[in-house]
Image (spheres, rainbow, N blue to C red):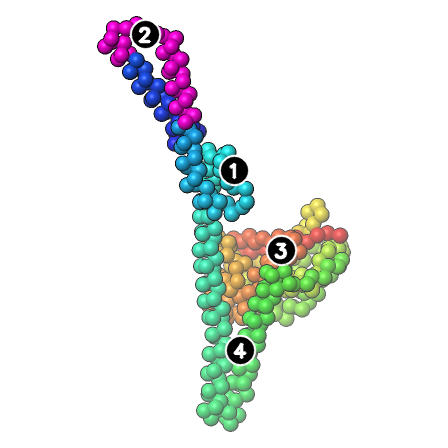
């Protein structure tokens, strides 16, 4: 119980008043040399103690209640608060402290979200600014006379087309993230073979892998493994993870796909033997537009939204995705899907 509670204040004042009355009785006895009537004195002291205790307690409680009621009701924002304060005044301090902690957490979360918002807007403007300025430069050059120069006009138009494609990819990825975050992404859950689908992905990206002499393989020969999920969206996840392993892995290295049974789920791993990712970068790897090596990432292409989309798709399946990495050894992305 807190020392400043109404009960403690009333108890302290009751003891103080009772002590004053006792001192007064002793003083009277010494002055008038009268013998103290102990029974009457004890009865008087008890009346003073209990009377002052209840009087002070009720007065302090009413005084505090009248001033706390409106504030407390505003803090709780719910009906029936007045009765709660009147009958549970001793708990008000604890409740206000809890509310203050919750409000401080909300403020901290809002500050963090505001920081992410500013960083996100800065990243979006930067990602869009690069292709826009490229397009502007190429068009101005063509308008200034290069349009009729057959040695450069087709080259500049081709570069302009690539910049437009990059902007379209960024907008489409942003639209997909928006749909996922607002629960507007339609998932078509069906049963299908994850091993067969992964082989399709490896076949699709084979040419990219050959350009960097990266070998694509399964850890071992797997039988058919049926899972439940949106096949097209999970294929998008696999393409993103495998292409990333090719782009940012070691030239002449390898990318390996593994499957493990985990009760009702299947764990899928995509592992490379590249340069790895530092521990400082791992926690932010799935953030929108976050790049470990910004200059190298832009050289390799991409929107910077791939892993954010991957995470959202897996979470939309009520599953989880993780990453582990050691610098100089390689990186492994792993996620789960429900097994059929």
Image height of 127 relative to 274, above or below: below
- The percent coordinates of residue 187 (x first, y second) are 69, 61
Residue 8 figure quarter: top left
Give the alpha-carbon distance from disc 1 to disc 2, as whole Å: 47 Å
The reply to whether residue 29 is visible in this rendering is yes
Q: Which of marks 3 and 4 is nearer the N terminus?
A: 4
Q: Which of marks 1 and 2 is in front?
A: 2
Disc 1 crowd rating (10 Å Cα; few below 14, some 14-19, many 20+) is some
Question: Label 4 to label 2, Cα distance in Å?
Answer: 105 Å
Which residue occupies the foreground of this view, 115 or 90? 90
In the structure shown, which secondary structural element does the residue marked by tag 4 occupy?
A: helix
Residue at the bottom extreme of this rendering: 148
Q: Earlier in the sequence, mark 4 or mark 2?
A: 2
The disc placed on residue 36 is 2
Gap in angstroms between the C-alphas marked 2 and 3: 83 Å
> At 67% from the left edge and 69% from the top edge, which residue is drawn?
204
């Amino acid at each position: 119980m807190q020392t400043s509670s109404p009960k403690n204040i009333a108890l302290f004042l009751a003891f103080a008043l009772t002590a004053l009355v006792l001192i007064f009785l002793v003083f009277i006895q010494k002055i008038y040399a009268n013998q103290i009537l102990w029974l009457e004195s004890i009865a008087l002291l008890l009346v003073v103690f209990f009377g002052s205790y209840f009087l002070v307690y009720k007065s302090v409680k009413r005084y505090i209640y009248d001033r706390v009621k409106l504030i407390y009701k505003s803090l709780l924002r719910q009906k029936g608060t007045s009765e709660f304060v009147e009958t549970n005044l001793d708990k008000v301090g604890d409740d206000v402290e809890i509310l203050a902690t919750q409000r401080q957490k909300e403020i901290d979360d809002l500050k963090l979200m505001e920081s992410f918002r500013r960083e996100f807007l800065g990243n979006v403007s930067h990602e869009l600014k690069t292709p826009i300025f490229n397009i502007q430069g190429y068009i101005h050059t063509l308008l200034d006379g290069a349009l009729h120069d057959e040695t450069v006009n087709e080259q500049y138009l081709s570069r302009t087309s690539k910049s437009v494609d990059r902007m379209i990819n960024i907008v489409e990825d942003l639209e997909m993230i928006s749909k996922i975050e607002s629960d507007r992404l339609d998932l078509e859950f069906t049963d299908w073979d994850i091993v067969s689908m992964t082989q399709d992905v490896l076949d699709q990206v084979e040419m990219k892998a050959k350009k960097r002499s990266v070998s694509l393989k399964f850890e071992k020969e797997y039988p058919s493994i049926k899972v439940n999920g949106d096949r097209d969206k999970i294929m998008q996840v696999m393409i993103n993870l495998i292409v990333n392993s090719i782009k940012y892995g070691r030239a002449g290295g390898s990318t390996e796909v593994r499957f493990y049974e985990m009760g009702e789920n299947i764990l899928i791993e995509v592992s490379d033997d590249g340069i790895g990712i530092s521990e400082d970068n791992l926690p932010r790897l799935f953030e929108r537009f976050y790049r470990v090596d910004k200059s190298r990432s832009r050289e390799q292409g991409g929107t910077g939204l791939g892993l954010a989309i991957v995470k959202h798709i897996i979470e939309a399946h009520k599953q989880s995705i993780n990453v582990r990495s050691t610098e100089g050894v390689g990186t492994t992305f792993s996620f789960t899907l429900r097994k059929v």
